[in-house]
Image (spheres, helix red, strand yellow):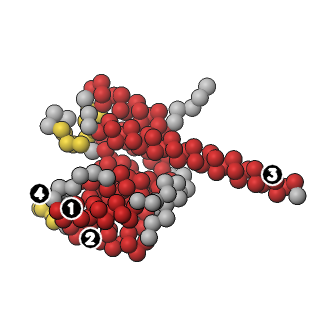
Amino acid sequence: MTSVTLADKLQGISEDIRRDGHAPIRRLMVMKQWLAAPGRLAAFGIWAAAQAATCKAKGKAAGTLLQEARTLLADANMRRPRVNRAAATRLHARLHDFQNEFKKVQWASVRMVHDWNLLVIEEGLAIYLWYSDMVSLGYDLAADYCRHYDLRSGDGLSRPSTVRVTHIAAFTTAIEAMEKVRGLHAKKLKHTAAQH
């Protein structure tokens, strides 16, 4: 009997969205346990930021920030991202400042986000730079990456979200395959060293 992978669960979410037209965003919580394994959260942060950087900008200033993100993340290794930390820190600050407007609503203050892809890049960089052990931020990043507002289903997972949920499933499968190869390679090296 084969075990159900995270990719299988994510594909199930995509199928439910296709069938029902929407799904609650909290369904992405299935990612938390997967993201807890060493190295996965930072890799996911950089991967999600790189994916968001490929999207179309809303305006010239946003386009400049997206191009800067594309350049910074162009050669990032999926499994072990090595991104220039100083450049990533500067870009993160610029992204935060670009959308640093808050609006008071009842008892809280809500951040006004005009370009969702820039927010995803900002969140992904923050995870990579400072929060690579905070799995709950990985869930938040997945939710923001997949979120799509729809008048009928509100702010959650709707039909356009299926593409991004499927992209995350492919990412997790690729990471698991790399980990398996790395594990086999390490086992082979250990065996070879034991023979000598």
Residue 98 image offset from top left, x and y in percent: 21, 67
**Residue 165, above or below 144:** above
In front of the other: label 1 or label 4?
1
Q: Which residue is mark 2?
A: 94
Residue 117 appears in the picture as rendered: yes
Q: Which mark is residue 191?
A: 3
Marks 1 and 4, the one that precedes in the sequence? 1
Residue type indicated by callout 3: His
Q: Secondary structure at mark 1?
A: helix
Q: Nearer the viewer, residue 84 or 123?
A: 84
Q: How far apart are the two marked residues, 3 and 2, measured between alpha carbons?
A: 49 Å
For the point 85% across and 55% down, the residue is: 194
Marks 2 and 4, the one that precedes in the sequence? 2
Marks 3 and 4, the one that precedes in the sequence? 4
- Classify the position of the N terminus by image quarter: top right
**Residue neighbourhood size for the residue with mark 3, other residues' Cα within 10 Å, grouped as few (<14), some (14–19), many (≥20):** few
Marks 1 and 2, the one that precedes in the sequence? 1
Q: How far apart are the two marked residues, 1 and 2, measured between alpha carbons?
A: 11 Å
